[in-house]
Every structure is written in structure tokens, then in C-alpha cells.
Amino acid sequence: MDETNLLTESEYNEMSALFVQEFILPLESQTEPVAILIGGQWGSGRSNLMNLSKQDFNDFSSVLVINEDELRRIHSKRFQAISVDQEDMSSFIEQNINQWKQDLITKAIQQKVNVVIEDTLTENDISFQMIPSLIDAGYRVIIRIMAVNESVSLLGIRERYEYQLEISGFGQSVNRKKHDLSYVGLIKSLHRIESECLFHEIELFNRHFKKIYHNKCSNHQLFNEPRGVMVLVHERDRLWTLEETIQYINSFDKVLKKMDNRGADPYEVIHVYRLQKERISKELLRLKGGSAKLLREVN
């Protein structure tokens, strides 16, 4: 980590005070506060699921939203970090971001305001570590997790990066190692969440934002047998439909076209092209076991 991209103590305190003043103090305290935690690996579609969660509140403007993208956007040294590594700017200011998340959740608990937190929800995440504190403070904790194949989330990361480049001239991305750690880590954290009853309601959604799993916990007792991990892995690994495969190819082609339009480095283009071919090759192999189903869909 490049320490020069971190805020000084005075800069950090000034920004933290501003957060409290603008984002927390105007919110009303709740007698029965709700915390919705949205998890999934990088690029899985968490932001869209967060937008869908607005429907849980009569007035979403009265909800504190903790979102890493927003925290990075207002970090005063974000452009300095981008100049070091445009494709993984978050690594250079991650320490500040994590501390802000912890501070904001702590302040939300103290004021008992409704909160929506978007994160990967792996065990190392501050948001995961603070679930017991939310429950102890009387929050109704709802966990929502995206169950999405790694190829789809890697494409999602690239789509967002290219879109941001096109709109603003710079983008925020995530390196493959960080993506893979969140992809694998979610399985372990989901197991703990369900086995330790670290929630009141838990829901899993597929790439189309359809709910595919639901369970509840009350007084440390599950309403149903814990099947979250099994559903997560099954949805990630299932055979794609023909429509999903075509959609994936078309989306990747659009990414490659954007890269070509901006004159991307040939090695960068080759790297992205290989990601696409790697996924299609896997699907072709898997189709050997599902060829009859595919033929029915084609016909």
C-alpha cells in the first residue's frame, strides 16, 4: 500500500465529521431499526440489488447507505491513487475506506438509524464483523446475497470500468486476485452467517435478481434447515441457458468494442478476449452433459 495516498489524521477526522454532519445527523432514530447487508463478490450486481432494497423503506431518504464506491468517490486523494493504478485505485485508499465503514456503522448504531450496507461480506469485511453489534443493538438484520458465476462478475467488473472510462475518462476496477478472494470467501462467511444465526432474514438472488433462497432466524433458531451455501454453489455452477450464453457473448463483444474505440493497449485487449474464450470453452465442455436440454431450447 502506498501510504502517501492515505489521508493524514487531521484530514481523516475532518472527512469523518463531515460524514456524520451530512449523512447521519439528519436521519431520524428508529424504535425498530433495520439493517440490510448486501453481499456478493466484486462485479456480481450488488449495486442493483441495493437499489431494489429501497422498496423495504417508506422513505429511503431516511436511510444511511454505506457503499464503497461512494466512499472512494469522495476520498480527497482518489485522483492521486488513480494516477498510481487506474485499474485498482481502491487498493491504495482501502485502509481509509475500511475505517470509514466501521465509523459509519458505529455512528448509525449509536443513533439507531436504518442502514443499508453494500459489501462483499467476506469474514475480513468490517460489515461482516459488525453484524453481532447490529443484532445486539436491536437491529433487524436482513442479509441479501448475489449468487452469481465468477465469469459473469468478472465481466461485470470490466463493463463498469469501460463505462466509467467512456463517461469520465477514468475508471475504478478490481484486480483478479481481490475478485477471487471475495468469490471464495463468500462461501465461508455465508456458512457462518447461517450456522451462527447472524441474521433475522437471509435471501439469495440469482444474476437476474430473482430470489432463489430464503430463511429466517429467531432467538438463535433457524426456521428451516440451513441450505444457503448449497444454493449459492449450485446457482454459481449450474449450466447456463442458451439465452444466458448468448447474452454473455454479446456483452463481452460490447466491452471489446469499447476497448477498441478508446485505443486500448493490445495486450489489455488480448487479456480480456481470453477471459471470454475461457468461459465459452468451459460452457462447451459442460454442454456435453446438457446437450439434450440445449437442443430442446434451440428447437
Image (spheres, rainbow, N blue to C red):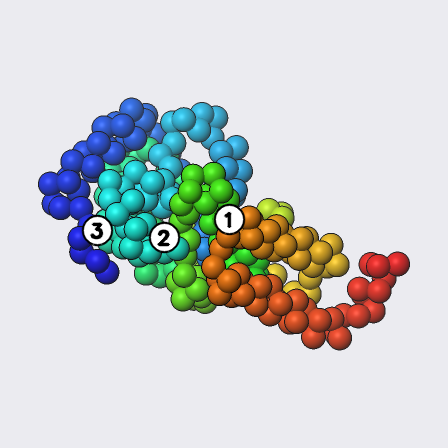
**Which sits in the foreground, 258 or 172?**
258
CB contact under 8 Å: marks 2 and 3: no
Which circle's residue, 2 or 3, is located before the other in the chain? 3
Q: Position of residue 23 (x, y in %)?
A: 30, 30
Q: Position of residue 28 (x, y in %)?
A: 32, 25
194 to 63, vertically: above or below: below
Numbered circles on residues, count: 3
Residue that appears at 58% across and 63% down: 273
Q: Is residue 115 left or right of residue 271?
A: left
Q: Pick whichever of labels 1 and 3 is earlier in the sequence.
A: 3
Query: To which residue does mark 1 refer?
Result: 262
Query: Which three-letter amino acid code belongs to the residue tagged 3?
Result: Asn
Please indicate whether residue 284 sits to the left or right of residue 165 in the image.
right
Pick whichever, 280 or 128, lies toward us: 280
Q: Earlier in the sequence, mark 1 or mark 2?
A: 2
What residue do we see at 18% from left, 46% from top? 7
Can you tell which of label 1 and label 2 is closer to the viewer?
1
Provide residue 263's location: percent of width, then percent of height.
Answer: 50, 52
Alpha-carbon span between mark 2 and mark 3: 13 Å
Q: Is residue 19 above or below residue 261?
A: above
- The quadrant where residue 195 appears: bottom left
Which residue is depicted at the point 44% across and 64% down?
Answer: 176
User: Foreground residue, 97 or 224?
Assistant: 97
Q: CA distance from mark 1 to mark 2?
A: 15 Å
